[in-house]
Amino acid sequence: MAHAAPAPGRARTQRQRTPDVFGPRVHTAARWALPVVLGLLYGYWAAANRRDGGPITGWNVLFGFVTAFAFMVLYVAVRAVAPRLMREMHALAWAVFAGCAIGFLYEQGGATVLAAIVLGLVIAAAFFLALLYRFSAREDATGPGEA
């Protein structure tokens, strides 16, 4: 198959670099935006569960924002502390966070506290097993202490 030869007298243009979509600036923005976005979604979800299709009141909005703020603070705390822990405790920290978050949402929907605790424990156990597998596989691939 024939290819066209470069035209004489024309300088070859260098390829332009593609923008670094996942550069340090994007990671810094995401580090702050992710807790805020997740917190607002979680707060809205909790407030919607609590009002159970009723009218939106000032107390309901306040409950949503307080819940969102609490979620954001806990998320940032777990994200800051968990990587410094051993892999089992790292997985346990995220599992407890996820179990409590889901259990709280379930309880706001009108379920009994016992049912919310059971669901939270089931979710936490599933998260623990999945994250322990992930952290173990990643550590085994890179060596201890480098994961």
Image (cartoon, helix red, strand yellow):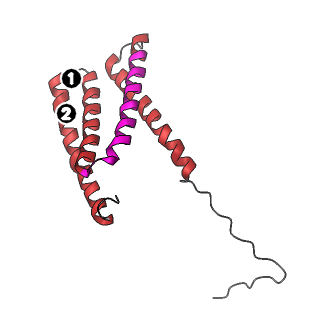
**Residue that extends furthest to the bottom in the rendered view of this protein:** 1
In magenta segment, residue 64: yes
Q: Residue 57: x and y, percent? A: 42, 11
Say what secondary structure mark 2 lies in: helix
| Left or right of 46 in this view: 115 | left
Q: Residue 84: x and y, percent? A: 33, 47
In magenta segment, residue 32: no
| Left or right of 54 in this view: 28 | right
The residue located at (43%, 21%) in the rendering is 65
Q: Residue 75: x and y, percent? A: 37, 36
| Left or right of 19 in this view: 7 | right
Say what secondary structure mark 1 lies in: loop
Residue 52 visible, this angle: no
Q: How far apart are marks 1 and 2 (CA)?
A: 10 Å
Image quadrant where residue 45 sits: top left
The residue that disc 2 covers is: 119
Asked if the residues shown at circle 1 and circle 2 are in contact, with their CB atoms under 8 angstroms apart, the answer is yes
- Answer above or below: position of 52 versus 90: above
Segment tinted magenta in the rendering = 62-87
Q: How crowded is mark 1: few (under 14 residues within 10 Å), some or many (20 or more)?
A: few
Magenta segment's dominant SS is: helix
Image quadrant where residue 141 sits: bottom left
Instruction: Say which label, 1 or 2, has the lower sequence index.
Output: 1
The residue located at (74%, 85%) in the rendering is 5
The residue located at (22%, 40%) in the rendering is 124
